[in-house]
Amino acid sequence: MPVDFSKILVVGVSSRALFNLEEEEQIFREKNIRGFREYQLANEDKLLEKGTAFPLVEALLKLNTHVDKKSPIVEVVIMSKNSPETGVRVLKAIEHYKLPITRWAFAAGEPLAPFIKAFNVDLFLSKDEKDVQKIIDTSDCATALIYDPPENFKPETDRVKFAFDADVVVFSEESEQIYKEQGIEAFHKHEKENEDVALNDGPFAALLRKLSYIQDFLPVEKELSPLRIAIVTARNSPSHMRVIKTFRKWNVYVDEAYFMGGWPKAPVLEAIGTHIFFDDQDSHLSDSKTKVPCGKVLYKTNSILKNYEKEIIVEPKKVKEK
């Protein structure tokens, strides 16, 4: 009987995102594939440390304990450029940490983008910028470039918490372009005038819908769900109502929303204890990534927002935010 992937959240995670393989990555860069293979074989019994995505993956897989074992709501696929031979350390680490992961893709240096559709991946997490950019440009899969893990991060284990920026992440670039090109006043005017018009989908809209859909399969009310969704956005009044009304039109339940109006996001994210936060701007991620696991949402190669990426980052109190 074929699997109905519409009822399953499929997360693809690279081995470097799941485990700390930075030393191995450096060896690969310095000694190429032969030196890397020799190192991996010589250290096959050396346990890999947990990486940035580990707490998220562990918590997500735990959601399956709330449903019938025959009908899991979360599947995780390891997607790696390792070969099966050099991937043995990854498999041993999965077994050691008792992660119920049974699907792997060891591509031996081949690009991973073509396998996103093959494995029906909803969310892909990686530390390889080229892979992430290719997937952003060629698929509808939500994907992010993962930063190094924050120090002293101690997440909940009985609940899993996602946090998202709004514009350019959950929503399209349209409103962000108005802000960038015309300023904050034009942005607020546009959002107020279009308060009852749902915002268009951004690259993480489908993932947000899938998470909300998965909440329906858990045997508790959404308000008590072990899967929680938060929006942490630089928007504030009067641009906040369009966000809330959009989720209503989408029939998406969001547990928490924080309209920051330019204040730093890091303290709020730390208070939430989010397992992962997705944002598109370095100005919001530079601090946040030191408090909670973070992923940067890259712009499509042809996006007009690419023109603003190299803007000078200043302290939040000195910049007008939307």
Image (tube, helix red, strand yellow):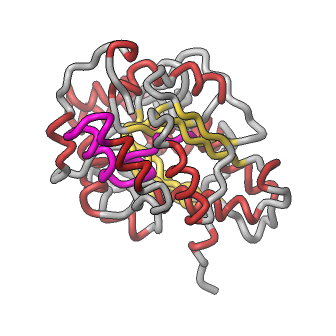
Could you tell me residue 211's position as x and y percent?
61, 57
User: Closest to the observer: 36 or 237?
Assistant: 237
Relative to 87, residue 237 above or below: above
Relative to 107, residue 291 above or below: above
**Quadrant of the rendering where the N terminus is positioned:** bottom right
In magenta stretch: residue 185: yes
Q: Specify the quadrant of the image occupied by residue 36.
A: top left
Could you tell me residue 158's position as x and y percent?
78, 39
Query: Horizontally, is 245 left or right of 78 in the view?
Result: right
User: Closest to the observer: 85 or 157?
Assistant: 157
Residue for point 80% across, 54% down? 65
Could you tell me residue 29's position as x and y percent?
22, 29
Could you tell me residue 263's position as x and y percent?
47, 21
Residue for point 17% across, 48% down? 304
Residue 80 visible: no
Residue 316 visible: yes
Q: Which residues are magenta?
A: 163-186
Residue for point 45% across, 42% down? 15
